[in-house]
Image: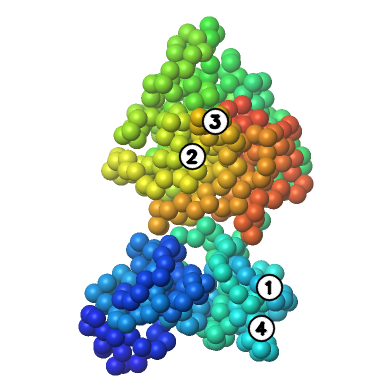
Amino acid sequence: MPPLLSLLLLLPGVAVHGQDCNVSGDCEGNMLDLTFTDSLDECVIFGLRSLGCTYVSWNQVLGDCIAYTDCTELDTTETETVSSSVECPVCHVPGLCLGNLVDQIHVDTEEQCVQICGEMEDNACQWTTYYQDGQICILLETCSSLKTCIDCYSSSGTCSTAQSSTSTPAPSTTSKYPTTTTSNAWRQEKRLFLLDSTLGSATLVSLDGSYTYCQLPVYPAPSKSPAVVNFMPDIGAVVACGEYVNENSEGGRCWYYKGGSVWARLPDSTDSHCPQATIDTVADQGWWIMGFEQTEGDTTCTEDWTSELFTGTDWVPGPAHPPNGFPGYYCVATLNATHSLFTGGYSTWTDSWLYNWETNEVTKTSPLNQGRTFHGCAAPEGRGAFVAGGTFTDGNGTFNVTSVEFFDSATERWSLEPALGLFDRAAGTTLLTADQTVLALLPGSDQVFQLDRDFYWTPLQGVRLPAPFNGYSWTKAVLVPDNFALGCN
């Protein structure tokens, strides 16, 4: 930026002329349109497809992007806002450009891709997307929007090769995926543990195709129907708790399995947990179980709230439910060491709440785009959270929900993502995470689906479940490390 312009921008109400790029302050001019984006570059792309737009302003905190027909002055007191001419180059932005395709070729570097675009006759190429992993260069005439992808970057045709360096740091907002190449090493490092809640049978499934599956000792509780099953890394064991109460069992009986020929007893939980209306999550503080309570002496479930935490040695009271009351059949995912996320649920549908482990406070956050219950959720470490599947009920009946949504923990906003597909059942969808990879088990299918680099759900090749997945109420599924139950293959 010229020194004189830098000096003038220190004053509010400074006139702006020419092609100013990424300057501090908010445009004052004729507002044309508004949207929300994750970066200034995406805001510029929005401006390019807004007829008559010459400038955009983007608030770095709120994420709102305003398109202007002109920018007569720049209000530099708005320090959280940056502005750019739509003629400014857009360089090395994470994402796939969606627009009119010109060609796709194989080149060694992103710099070569941008150079080839700039050298095409008649300005036929205006945008590029470069996949680093496959070294694929996509040449486009237009770029109407960006789609999330792994290790792919887009640039405008006005971007010089020096600017489109792959050393450019990633944006500060949360990304759904890391910007480094995601390998499939997790397929050798993880196995899938399944527990059938009608028979109590336990199965270990290979995810790398090295074997099909092997049987583990049967879950020993009398009813064979635990309310929740998870894996606790701190004790290196699969843990299971809660079951239908009958004359041969006590509510809250809990067990763990580390391998070998038998399960072992955990200390009994304090509460009796309803098998089909209880959810859980593993946080740094321990294994958190919450949900409806089961009446002692029969299989009736009440709508009384239960919440307790297994620390690895003892049971202690768990966090409270959201202040609007406890929604049944919702989902909870742990985002990081300090926060867990409540989503959906019967009667609350679109509500989302954040629980702060440090302050013990529950605060409301952005609502889901689609109301849902009996859905799956998972949180890749440091990336936010996904929800998928479930059902929705209104005056016209109950419907499958096949949509997928992503919660950006930096902006606390939900975005709709490609759907799981058309399935006869969506209630009881299970989501799992492995090394930033999101997996889905879909009711009625014997396949394991992976969210791939193009952000679509594809089945893992060579992997089949021993039987079609029956939904999380009846088939409990967790990922375990490859050294779990050694000798089972």
Query: Residue 36: x and y, percent?
Result: 43, 62
Type of the residue with mark 2: Gly
Tell me which numbered mark, 3 or 2, is placed earlier along the sequence: 2
Report the front residue among 176 and 370: 370
Please give the label number shown on residue 427.
Answer: none
Tell me which numbered mark, 3 or 1, is placed earlier along the sequence: 1
Residue drawn where x is 49% and y is 26% of the image: 277
Tell me which numbered mark, 2 or 1, is placed earlier along the sequence: 1
Q: Which residue is mark 1?
A: 101
CA gap between label 4 and label 3 equals 51 Å
Report the front residue among 38 and 288: 38
Q: The residue tagged with tag 4: helix, strand or loop?
A: loop
Q: Which residue is mark 2?
A: 371
Q: The residue tagged with tag 2: helix, strand or loop?
A: loop
Q: Quadrant of residue 320?
A: top left
* Crowd tier of the residue under label 2, counting other residues whose Cα lies within 10 Å: few below 14, some 14–19, many 20 or above: many
Q: Which residue is mark 4?
A: 124
Q: Which residue is mark 3?
A: 396
Type of the residue with mark 3: Asn
- Count of numbered circles on the image: 4
Residue drawn where x is 39% and y is 63% of the image: 63
CA gap between label 1 and label 4 equals 10 Å
Report the front residue among 290 and 23: 23
Type of the residue with mark 1: Leu
Name the quarter where the N terminus is drawn. Answer: bottom left
